[in-house]
Image: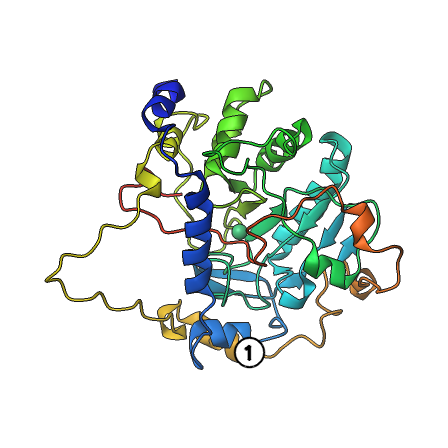
Amino acid sequence: MAFGFAQAFRTFGKLALAGAIGASLAAGDVGAEQKTPSPGSAKALFGGVSLPTQGPAQPIGFYAKGCMTGAVALPTDGPTWQAMRLSRNRRWGNPVTIALLERFSQDAAKYAGWPGILVGDIAQPRGGPMASGHASHQIGLDADIWLTPMPARRMTAEEREDLPFTSMLQKNKFLTIDPRVWTESHARLLMLAASYPQVERIFVNPAIKKKMCDTWTGDRTNLGKLRPEYGHDSHFHIRLKCPPGVAGCTPQAPVAAGDGCDKSLAWWFTPAPWAPPKPPKPDAKPPKPPREMMVSDLPKACAAVLDAASVASMQAATYGGPSAAGGPSAANGPSAASALAAAPATDDDDGELPDVGPVPNDKPALQ
Ligand SMILES: [Zn+2]
């Protein structure tokens, strides 16, 4: 390894940052994200639409600035998946995304020792920016997967709202995996997700990336797809490539060659990513608050996407057809408490899965 972690830890390990990191990032990030969007803003308009457009599926724009047509919904339940936080109505994606999630869930059960996946946010019915939780997820090619395995029974809608996130990190330690929750199946699950050619990159917490770098003894060809990022300690984020031949989809620069177990990872274990922003100079003008994103800031086609005719119903636009739509019943077995007792509550159970925290300017590589 070009840059020793030991060295990073020697210089940095004593800084008492552990508690501050998660707390301050989560608070700042979520606080800013949860301000109610103004009427007429892109977040308000895209968040106010409950059904996708008719017609062919198309991602429009970039992961963090775009929208989509022709989305389909992941069925709330399958043999190897359950969709979470149903009230958010964010089970929508490009059909290639939904197909991949179903396939991944089956493969996870077959090959990763993972009984099934819990699927978090994918996208809103027409994509676009969300009022809470994410900078990306706007064109139907991003999906969040919990790092908690699916319980053996179907959860009720209430349980899916309330199940707390389980962090893979040790409390009160700096970027350290908790050996009581991390398992080999977690590692296999991530490498399985990275193995699909249509998966472009996967965001994980830097501690998870480091754990993978240190311990993965199998084929490391796809290890470079795992990208360290703020947060992402209780879920990971799968990003698909733009489907071939879709002109309006703006691709992201490919990940750098190699396994990524290098100085770009070591940087996360230095003070730089966690330093508070420099205080403004006393004579400086107060910075303008960031302007809300308007529909006019998105690709032109997104205004028409908002106005386009809806599909007839959620069932009609569910992947696999109306018979797949189903839905969790409120009467299916004992309360979540017993089956899910193994999942300890976490401090960051704020109902959000933030994708990015504040990103310093000197971040070495665009994620
Ligand atoms: Zn995400």
Q: Residue at x 53, y 33 (%)?
A: 208
Residue at position x 32%, y 70% in the image: 291
Q: Please indicate whether residue 81 sits to the left or right of residue 355 in the image.
A: right
Query: Label 1 sits on what residue type?
Result: Ala
Residue 107 x %, y %: 73, 37
Lateral position of residue 228 relative to residue 312, left or right: left
The vertical placement of 334 against 223, above or below, is below
Q: Residue at x 36, y 51 (%)?
A: 358
Query: Circle 1 sits in a helix, a strand or a loop, which is it?
Result: loop
Check the image and report above or below for 45 versus 161. below
- Vertical arrangement, residue 213 with respect to residue 140, above or below: above
Q: Is mark 1 within 8 Å of ligand 1?
A: no
Q: Quadrant of residue 3?
A: top left
Residue 271 percent location from the top left of the image = 32, 36
In the rendered image, residue 74, in percent from the top left (x then y), is placed at 70, 58
**The C terminus, quarter of image:** top left
The residue to which callout 1 is attached is: 308
Residue 236 or residue 196, whichever sits in front: 236
Q: Is residue 289 visible?
A: yes
